[in-house]
Image (cartoon, rainbow, N blue to C red):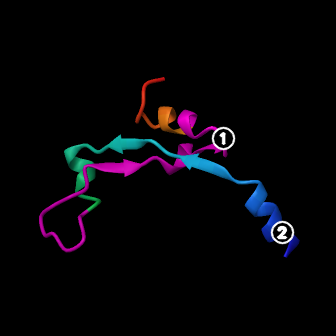
């Protein structure tokens, strides 16, 4: 139970950037239920970055939602 309390007090935002796929790469990522349609972006999970709970604006800036 103490571990749960610790997690509640010490949490972070995780942010990943979206990477645009080439036409060739899109064929690897079909959209479920939509024959012939493919994803245009994938999430860059290899470069996940964590931000302290109060650094939400920095996380949004990192993924390009707001200017740096």
- Circle 1 is placed at which residue position? 54
**Secondary structure under the numbered disc 2 in the rendered image:** helix
**Secondary structure under the numbered disc 1 in the rendered image:** loop
> Which mark is nearer the camera, 2 or 1?
1
Magenta stretch contains residue 7: no
Foreground pick, 27 / 55: 55
Task: Rate crowding at label 2 as few (under 14), some (14 to 19) or many (20 or more) other CA atoms within 10 Å.
Answer: few
Magenta stretch contains residue 39: yes
- Residue ID at (66%, 41%): 54
Asked if marks 2 and 1 touch (Cβ < 8 Å), the reply is no
| Corner quadrant of residue 28 | bottom left
What percent of the width, then of the height, locates residue 59?
54, 38
Task: Please give left or right for residue 28 compared with residue 2 in the image.
Answer: left
- Residue ID at (76%, 54%): 10
> Furthest-top residue in view?
68
- Magenta residues, as a range? 30-58
- Residue ID at (49%, 45%): 16
- Residue ID at (67%, 46%): 53
Picture disc at residue 7: none
- Circle 2 is placed at which residue position? 3
> Furthest-left residue in view?
36
């Amino acid at each position: 139970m103490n571990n749960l309390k610790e997690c509640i007090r010490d949490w972070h935002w995780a942010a990943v950037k979206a990477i645009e796929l080439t036409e060739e790469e899109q064929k690897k990522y079909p959209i479920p239920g939509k024959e012939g349609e493919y994803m245009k972006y994938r999430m860059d999970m290899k470069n996940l970055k964590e931000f302290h709970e109060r650094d939400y604006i920095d996380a949004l800036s990192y993924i390009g939602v707001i200017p740096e």
